[in-house]
Amino acid sequence: MRRVALLGATGSIGRQAIEIVAAHPGLELCALMSGSQPLEALAHEHGVAHLQVGGDPEPLLETAAPDVVLNAIVGFAGVRATLWALEHGVALALANKESLVAAGELALEAQGRGGGLLIPIDSEHSAVFQCLEGRAPETVDSLVLTASGGPFRGRFRAELATVTVGEALAHPTWRMGRKITVDSATLANKGLELIEAHWLFGLPYERIEVVVHPSSVVHSLVRFRDGAALAHLGYPDMRVPISFGLTYPERAATPVPPLDLASGLTLEFEPPDLDAFPLLTSARDAGERGGTYPCVFNAANEVAVEGFLAGRLGFLDIAATVEDTLGRVSGAPARDLDDLVEADAEARRFAEEALREPAGQRRA
Ligand SMILES: NC(=O)c1ccc[n+]([C@@H]2O[C@H](COP(=O)([O-])OP(=O)(O)OC[C@H]3O[C@@H](n4cnc5c(N)ncnc54)[C@H](OP(=O)(O)O)[C@@H]3O)[C@@H](O)[C@H]2O)c1
């Protein structure tokens, strides 16, 4: 029996993970965590003894002693759980990409000490993980992360100034939490995934490409030095990578149907529009600069997305806020978690200040 601590249990990934665990006789939930929603009913329904709402997940994880931590918390709040699992050699099924973006170096150091397995749940990274399995690193040429393009694919930058929250939340292929859905609309999500892929797979940024693929059937590809490329295909359904991460290396059955190729699948690819969606470039730059720049990118983006969802700023102001914030920090590397928390807090303060500027004075 594999004991799963599910953090972010009330969210989109959390709910799908509960379904996967309930359907698998070899998995059981041993701990649940949320940010603010009560967990008693869920715990009662699934017979879970250990619960925690908000705060540091460490006491919960120490008490519950899981075999695997599924980190499905949204945002920087997931950092402590990621570091705890890696430090303690407990398998980490990671949906919370923000923690690896913000704390990539610290996370790899913790994994070096703890030695635990890190399995990505993000569909693109799960795809790359599977395409890379058993291959020698020197045979790999490059990675290709696919992006659906979000609800505003094909629109010019000028057309995006007045888009609404409702339009940004209407994702064409994935049903997800609000924050990641807005990130998908700005392509910040793909920027976060680019940095996540760099840390997970150890490739330099120039060997990680992003292409837009509207139907989200090809989840990602790996190109090899002999000219071959391996791709991972499937219907866009997060239960597949969640199940893979929780049952690895077993690959358990899920209710997701196999691909029906004969019914006609469209596999189109195009380059991302970096003028309309500049956050992808900002993320790449932040990743290449290293230090705490990725942490700052993430923090400023979280503040700006919250501001957008609350109606405090326009869609294009999200990228402007992130750029302003990146321009104000030193980006000095974090020696430890305290340094990182400080860099995150400083970036949030700067982003809040940028948000309070009158719209007319913000950079376009
Ligand atoms: N949804 C997807 O399809 C998908 C795909 C790939 C990757 N991801 C990644 O998975 C993560 C979760 O995404 P989601 O779409 O599931 O988000 P979501 O629906 O917004 O759920 C977020 C979860 O995090 C919890 N949470 C928030 N703040 C917390 C805190 N301080 N401590 C503990 N728990 C906290 C929330 O609890 P409350 O309900 O109490 O607020 C909720 O359970 C994100 O990092 C996202 O990028 C998601």
Image (tube, grey):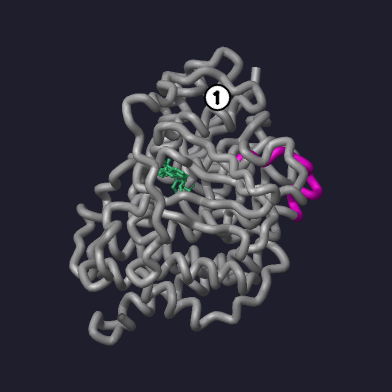
Query: Which quadrant of the figure has residue 245?
Result: top right
**Residue 164: percent from the left, percent from the top?**
19, 60
Residue appearing at x 64%, y 70% in the figure: 290
Side of 277 relative to 164 (left or right): right
**Residue 244: percent from the left, percent from the top?**
57, 29
Highlighted magenta segment, given as a residue range: 109-119
Up-down relation of residue 169 to residue 50 (above or below): below
Is residue 244 visible to us here? yes
Residue 49 or residue 240, whichever sits in front: 240
Image quarter where the C terminus lies is: bottom left
Residue 311 or residue 262, whichever sits in front: 262
Residue appearing at x 47%, y 20% in the figure: 254
> What kind of residue is marked 1?
Leu
Query: Which quadrant of the figure has residue 217?
Result: top left
Furthest residue toward bottom: 361
Q: Which residue is mark 1?
A: 29
Up-down relation of residue 353 to residue 47 (above or below): below
* Secondary element at tag 1: strand
**Residue 149: percent from the left, percent from the top?**
35, 54
